[in-house]
Image (spheres, helix red, strand yellow):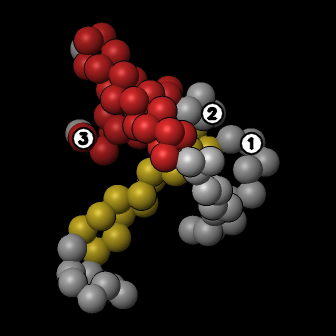
Amino acid sequence: MNVQLLARAVELALEAEGSFVAMNNRVSQSVPHLHVHIVPRRKKDGLKGFFWPRYKYDDTAHVVRVQKSIKAAIAAIQKQN
């Protein structure tokens, strides 16, 4: 449920056309744990299999803007429900 909410929020906040959601546990980890990747998707974004192009944030302010956008999207989705 939380992953679904976060995937929707990432799409909304980053104006993505969709998302790629992957879960990983134990294999290739020094400390076994479960974690989830939520990758915003756009047509012709270069995603090939599990490998996607990675882009650096411009600066710390950019990180904070993205974080605030995702938090606002979560709040908006929760308000609708």
Instruction: Give the residue at mark 3.
Output: 2
Say above or below: 38 vs 35.
Answer: above
Q: Secondary structure at mark 2?
A: loop
Q: Residues within 10 Å of mark 2 (few under 14, many from 20)?
A: few
**What residue would you read off at disc 2?**
17
Above or below for 54 versus 57: below
What numbered label is drawn on residue 75?
Answer: none
**Residue visible at 28% across and 74% down?**
25
**Residues marked 3 and 2 touching at CB (< 8 Å):** no
Tag 1: residue type?
Lys
Q: Earlier in the sequence, mark 1 or mark 2?
A: 2
Indicate the amino acid at tag 3.
Asn
- Calculate the distance from the C-alpha at mark 1 to the C-alpha at mark 2: 7 Å
Q: Is residue 25 above or below residue 71?
A: below
Total numbered badges shown on the rendered structure: 3
Q: Position of residue 6 (x, y in %)?
A: 35, 38
As drawn, the residue found furthest toward the front would be 60
For the question of whether residue 19 can be seen, the reply is no
Quadrant for the C terminus in the image = top left
Q: CA distance from mark 3 to mark 2?
A: 20 Å
Name which residue type carries label 2: Glu
Q: Are marks 1 and 2 in contact (CB under 8 Å)?
A: yes
